[in-house]
Image: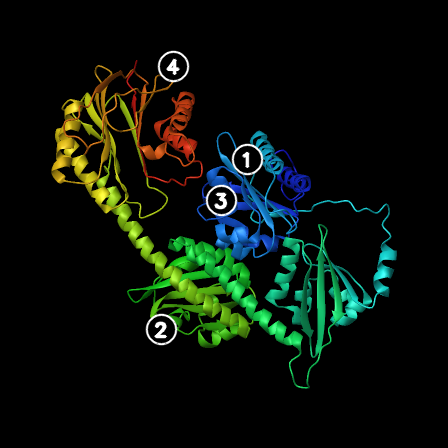
């Protein structure tokens, strides 16, 4: 980590900052997220006061996903969730992955030139639902201090593969540590006493506790109860522990120690760990009846499976593209079932086409891609044909039915799950394990149910991808394939679709070569985000091409006439510029379009002042005043659509002024680099709410 040789694994910059923040704010736990710009994902880098496996569902959160930390980054504001009910209303998916009573705050780590990530803080259920002004100010100022530390570090922080856990150091009100006296006290009690750390490991247990649990102390110390005691291996029992850790509230439950000894467990958490009280549970019953604890354990196991499916289903409902489905399976499904490999394939023209994978080298994926449905190399084709899942606990079991399959990879166990929607085969999902794995009946049931959810998500995602590709192809066909080359004129352009919908918009740009020294540049925006807007955009571009070379006011007037003849209800903003490179001049006329930005070398950048004129499609008799500018060597003219400056929660004038300041500081950069910087200045997260078109022109003739 920046500024520390120890890095994140030691008491590094982020670890120290987070631990100090948790202590000073009175939070029970917290986390620091770093923004992975390339993947558009928030990654949990450091966690404090909570086990890493408890935080695993929120380890990687796509920036587009609805969650408190993503909203904090996208909107640049403090997000406060005072209760679980408030969380469920605002963020149902996050509430499904964090079903505990708590209070939560997320604050952005927003720097001067970029977003670093977010600070997440959790308080116990006893915390007030509302935050005081002082508390909000304290959280916000803390986030600013962390951001400042990140920006002043000599190198950017590295995002770890797994979050580092930092302990919360706290003092006890004891002047001494009478360890033996405390142990003697616990041994004299008639009930079992167990201490767990925040990772769930047993750090102490009394002799009575060991007797009640049925194992020697040496066999239990350092283990997690649900791992060392098979009869406690229940998702709901582990979830009771998670609830206790997160909410900091006492939790009680019953479990049956085989064959017939019901026990009562009471968990009492604090910042250092959990104290567990174990007592025998007695109750009426007839011989042959299931003890009450056994019935409860059965019900909780079913509830655990249901919770697991609800959790994953919540995530799958929010996936959009096939890539999203694959990422969710890799990030959440594989860890949940202890798997480490994934192959997702679909049936296409009698062959299995791999649409996503994880944990396999590319050469193996290439070998599996395109296999015939009736292949005997793997069971995938049979599973797809029969609609019945197949489970292989080890390589020998796989080899009995498919001798070649074990040699494909180094995997040791497999679950082949058919993906079927309304009786129609969609594909096959393969989960694989690095070690032999016995699939219990409960696990098979959960995986089979999960396959149905994945099938629905994959089918929906494939339809979206097809529509997306169609929309993208249409959009690209309507935009110019290339821009002309003119001596003395450097040109760069960019089109970015809105980050939602089908990516069909009406923003357009074009540069038209008129002769060796003159050219026309145009940029515009047709109202709406649908096929009609894109179609009208193509017609407007054609009309401008037909009249390019005429004076700018005439070009807009004739285009307005064409728009009226089309009888469209859509309005169009448009800016037309006539460039005379031999005279270093440009004449501009605008129909309701945002004014361009101008940068002269060695002088302050500015917003070009244009006389206002109405949008095309409003008034056939409207005049279009012309503004003339000098385009000296090195001068850069920035044309853009309103999607660049209309960011939610911001004022257009202040946003434009901010762009002018950026242009003044970076106006001499290459045009492509300058475009990237201008866009990031307004949209650091890349979540555009409207289409953005940009066209930059620079006179690169010698002075």
Whether pointer 3 and pointer 1 mark residues with C-beta atoms closer than 8 Å, the reply is no
Q: Is residue 646 among what the camera can see?
A: yes
- Residue 428 sits above or below residue 127 on the image: below
Which residue is identified by label 3?
A: 70
Q: Which mark is residue 385?
A: 2
Q: Position of residue 507 (x, y in %)?
A: 27, 37
Q: Which one is earlier in the sequence, the residue at label 4 or at label 1?
A: 1
Q: Which one is earlier in the sequence, the residue at label 1 or at label 2?
A: 1
Q: Is residue 436 among what the camera can see?
A: no
Residue visible at 62% across and 46% down in the picture: 30
Question: Which structural element holds mark 4?
Answer: loop
- Crowding at dot 1, Cα within 10 Å, few <14 / some 14-19 / many 20+, comes out as few
Q: Which one is earlier in the sequence, the residue at label 2 or at label 3?
A: 3
Separation (CA) of disc 4 from disc 2: 71 Å
| Quarter of the N terminus within the rendering | top right
Separation (CA) of disc 4 from disc 3: 39 Å
Residue visible at 30% across and 54% down in the picture: 466
Q: Position of residue 125 (x, y in %)?
A: 63, 52
Whether pointer 1 and pointer 2 mark residues with C-beta atoms closer than 8 Å, the reply is no
Whether pointer 2 and pointer 3 mark residues with C-beta atoms closer than 8 Å, the reply is no
Q: Nearer the viewer, residue 563 or 665?
A: 563
Separation (CA) of disc 1 from disc 2: 51 Å
Separation (CA) of disc 3 from disc 1: 21 Å
Which residue is identified by label 1?
A: 156
């Amino acid at each position: 980590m920046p500024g520390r040789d120890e890095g994140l694994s030691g008491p590094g910059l982020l670890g120290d900052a987070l631990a100090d923040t948790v202590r000073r704010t009175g939070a029970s736990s917290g986390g620091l997220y770093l923004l992975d710009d390339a993947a558009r994902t928030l990654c949990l880098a450091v966690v404090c006061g909570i086990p890493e496996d408890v935080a695993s569902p929120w380890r990687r959160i796509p920036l587009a996903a609805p969650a408190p930390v993503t909203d904090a980054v996208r909107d640049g504001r403090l997000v406060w969730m005072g209760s679980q009910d408030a969380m469920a209303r605002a963020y149902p998916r996050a509430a499904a992955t964090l079903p505990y009573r708590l209070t939560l705050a997320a604050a952005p780590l927003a720097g001067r030139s970029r977003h670093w990530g977010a600070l997440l803080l959790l308080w116990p259920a006893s915390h007030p639902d509302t935050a005081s002004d002082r508390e909000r100010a304290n959280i916000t100022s803390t986030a600013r201090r962390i951001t400042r530390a990140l920006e002043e570090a000599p190198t950017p922080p590295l995002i770890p593969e797994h979050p580092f856990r930092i302990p919360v150091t706290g003092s006890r009100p004891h002047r001494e540590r009478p360890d033996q006296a405390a142990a003697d006290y616990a041994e004299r009690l008639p009930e079992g006493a167990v201490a767990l750390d925040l990772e769930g490991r047993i750090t102490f247990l009394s002799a009575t506790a060991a007797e009640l649990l049925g194992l020697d102390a040496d066999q239990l110390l350092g283990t997690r109860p649900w791992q060392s005691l098979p009869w406690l291996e229940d998702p709901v029992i582990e979830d009771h522990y998670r609830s206790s850790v997160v909410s900091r509230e006492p939790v009680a439950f019953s479990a049956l120690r085989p064959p017939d000894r019901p026990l009562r467990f009471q968990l009492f958490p604090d910042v250092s760990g959990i104290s567990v009280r174990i007592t025998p549970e007695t109750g009426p019953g007839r011989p042959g009846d299931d003890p009450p604890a056994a019935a409860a354990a059965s019900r909780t196991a079913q509830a655990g499976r249901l919770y697991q499916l609800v959790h994953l289903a919540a995530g799958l409902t929010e996936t959009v593209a096939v890539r999203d489905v694959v990422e969710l399976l890799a990030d959440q499904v594989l860890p949940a079932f202890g798997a480490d490999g994934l192959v997702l394939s679909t049936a296409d023209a009698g062959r299995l086409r791999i649409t996503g994978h994880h944990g396999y080298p590319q050469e193996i994926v290439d070998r599996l891609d395109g296999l015939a449905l009736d292949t005997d190399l793997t069971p995938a084709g049979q599973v797809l044909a029969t609609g019945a899942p197949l489970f292989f606990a080890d390589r020998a079991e796989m080899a009995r039915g498919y001798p070649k399959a074990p040699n494909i990879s180094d995997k040791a166990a497999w679950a082949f799950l058919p993906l079927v929607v309304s009786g129609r085969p969609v594909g096959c999902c393969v989960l694989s394990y690095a070690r032999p794995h016995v699939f219990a009946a409960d696990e098979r049931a959960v995986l089979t149910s999960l396959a149905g959810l994945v099938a629905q998500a994959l089918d929906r995602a494939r339809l979206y991808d097809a529509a997306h590709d169609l929309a993208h192809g249409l959009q690209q066909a309507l935009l110019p394939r290339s821009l002309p080359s003119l001596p003395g004129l450097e040109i760069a352009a960019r089109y970015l679709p809105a980050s939602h919908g089908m990516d069909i918009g009406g923003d357009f740009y074009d540069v038209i070569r008129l002769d060796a020294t003159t050219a026309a540049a145009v940029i515009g925006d047709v109202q709406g985000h649908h096929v009609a807007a894109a179609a009208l955009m193509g017609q407007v571009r054609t009309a401008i091409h037909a009249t390019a070379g005429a004076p700018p006011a005439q070009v807009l007037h004739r285009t307005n006439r064409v728009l009226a003849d089309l009888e469209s209800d859509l309005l169009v903003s448009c800016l037309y510029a006539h460039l005379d490179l031999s005279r270093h001049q440009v004449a501009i006329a605008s129909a309701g379009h945002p004014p361009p930005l101008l940068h002269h070398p060695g002088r302050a950048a500015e917003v070009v002042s244009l006389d206002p004129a109405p949008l095309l499609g409003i008034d056939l008799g409207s005049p279009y005043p012309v503004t003339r500018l000098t385009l000296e060597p090195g001068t850069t003219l920035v044309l853009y659509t309103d999607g660049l400056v209309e960011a939610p929660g911001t004022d257009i004038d202040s946003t434009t002024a901010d762009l002018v300041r950026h242009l003044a500081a970076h106006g001499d950069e290459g045009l492509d680099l300058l475009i990237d910087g201008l866009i990031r200045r307004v949209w650091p997260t890349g979540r555009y709410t409207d289409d953005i078109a940009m066209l930059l022109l620079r006179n690169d003739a010698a002075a």
